[in-house]
Image (spheres, helix red, strand yellow):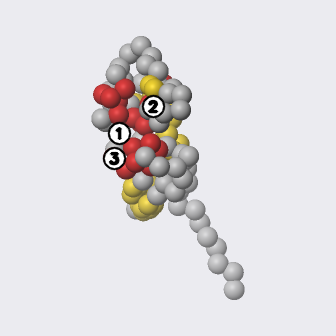
Amino acid sequence: STHKVNAIAETTVPLVISSKEATSRGRVTTVIPNGLHRIQLGEEYQVHIETRLASSLHISDPSVATILRDYPLSTDGDSRDVVIHKPSGVAFLDILSMASGQAVRRHFLS
């Protein structure tokens, strides 16, 4: 038997989003963050999609994305000290304090 399927709505789910970092107010592009996303399909249906970031190469936290983009890091010779090359603008620690603990651990403490 053949069943006819009628589309009730169409939508797209972005894999990246453009966010404003809270402290510097700079815009960064990040991957879709962890969480539950509700997508309305027409007036009668809503789909719930849960996303989980599985890669440490992709960044979902706007503060971490800003730090990695705007603050080049290097090591100081043979020591393990990290040198932060400060651009003009907002202080590194102010931006870092706005990042989620999970994002900081994933990108800086591995």
Which residue position is annotated with label 1? 99
Q: Please tell me whether mark 2 sits on a helix, a strand or a loop.
A: strand
Distance from label 2 to label 1 (Cα)?
Answer: 19 Å
Task: Depth check: give the residue in front, 38 or 1.
Answer: 38
How many residues crowd mark 3 within 10 Å: few (<14), some (14–19), many (20+)?
Answer: few
Which residue position is annotated with label 3? 101
Query: How many callouts does the rendering have?
Result: 3
Q: Is residue 64 left or right of residue 15?
A: left
How many residues crowd mark 2 within 10 Å: few (<14), some (14–19), many (20+)?
Answer: few
Task: Depth check: give the residue in front, 106 or 17.
Answer: 106
Which residue position is annotated with label 2? 82
Which amino acid, mark 1? Ala
Q: Residue 85, how many percent across, how many down?
A: 47, 21
Quadrant location of the N terminus in the rendered image: bottom right
* Residue found 35% across the figure and 20% down from its top: 90
Which amino acid, mark 3? Gly
How many residues crowd mark 1 within 10 Å: few (<14), some (14–19), many (20+)?
Answer: many
Contact flag, marks 1 and 3 (Cβ < 8 Å): yes
Quadrant of residue 48 within the rendered picture: bottom left
Residue furthest top as drawn:
88
Disc nearer the start of the sequence (2/3) = 2
Q: Please tell me whether mark 1 sits on a helix, a strand or a loop.
A: loop
Q: Residue 64, how many percent across, how many down?
A: 43, 37
